[in-house]
Image (cartoon, grey):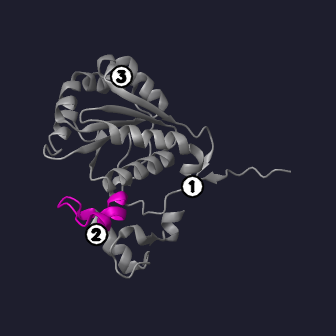
Amino acid sequence: MSVGFKVEEKLQDLFGDRLERTFRAVLMAKGGNLFAVEVDSHELLRNLSFELSAELLTEGYKVKEIFLPQDGALSEALTKLSDDAKGVAFLYLFIEPSSFNFIADQDLDGIIALFRVLNMERDAIAQKGWTIIIWGRPEQVKLLAQQAKDLWSCMSGDFPFLLNGRGIEPLPFSRDLTPVEAANLRTVGALGEVEAGDERVIVALLRALKDGNVAVQNTAFNSLWELTWTPQASEAA
């Protein structure tokens, strides 16, 4: 008799080759490129965006997160991206920043209106010089292709990552952090610097050290890759 529970697998075991192809495509992209990533689970979204941002950070890229529509007009959000550095912006469609869950019960007319605005702002995206990765559920990405045809024609790649009901191992970092903030926490020691706008990452690290949620395995402390995050019971639930 089989037991009806969901087996949680690691990201690499589920999508090893596709993951590598996605990493390589983004790393080789020139500024202004557009990609779409389709996900059917918010936990998968957390895993993917964390791993990709960690890879980009170690390669010297700046990585920023934009939540639409919460962050307002995309053109306004793009003005916050620096012009003097290579970077990748993660553009999340209808994701709640505090919980990183999909926002349910979205009005279809509102979604279409947002996508049409994105279509009109495609030139601002290209001129900024940053690579943009649009993250969304499969049905949202399909609708984006239909309603923002000019924008979609500029896409350099569309990468579907679908669990189709399978479980994925949750990431071992506090849910108080977004995936990019957590990736900054993991890579700050290796890169040797923290931007002025990354106070949340430093506060999270100090809190974790104080609460005993981070075990320092490397006494030289020359790399935060050597830190192990142990979630509290409330976080692991």
Most common secondary structure along the magenta stretch: helix
For marks 2 and 3, the one nearer the N-term is: 3
The image quarter containing residue 227 is bottom left
Q: Position of residue 15 (x, y in %)?
A: 55, 43
The label shown at residue 109 is 3
Residue at image coords 31%, 74%: 206
Q: Position of residue 107 (x, y in %)?
A: 39, 28
Q: Position of residue 123 (x, y in %)?
A: 19, 25
- Any part of residue 140 in sight: yes
Q: Which one is closest to the eye, mark 2 or mark 1?
A: 1
Q: Which residue is mark 1?
A: 169
The label shown at residue 53 is none
Residue at image coords 22%, 21%: 120
Magenta region: 182-200
Q: Which one is closest to the eye, mark 2 or mark 3?
A: 2
Q: Which one is closest to the eye, mark 3 or mark 1?
A: 1
The label shown at residue 203 is 2
Instruction: Answer whether residue 142 is magenta in the image.
Output: no
Q: Considering the numbered disc 1 on the image, is that residue within a helix, a strand or a loop?
A: loop
**Residue most extreme to the bottom:** 219
The image quarter containing residue 24 is top left
In depth, the one of 3 and 87 nearer the eye is: 87
Residues at marks 2 and 1 touching, judged by CB atoms closer than 8 Å:
no
Eyeballing the image, is 33 above or below 59? above
The quarter of the picture where the C terminus appears is bottom right
Residues at marks 3 and 1 touching, judged by CB atoms closer than 8 Å:
no
Residue at image coords 43%, 30%: 158
Real-space CA distance between mark 2 and mark 3, rounded to the nearest whole angstrom: 40 Å
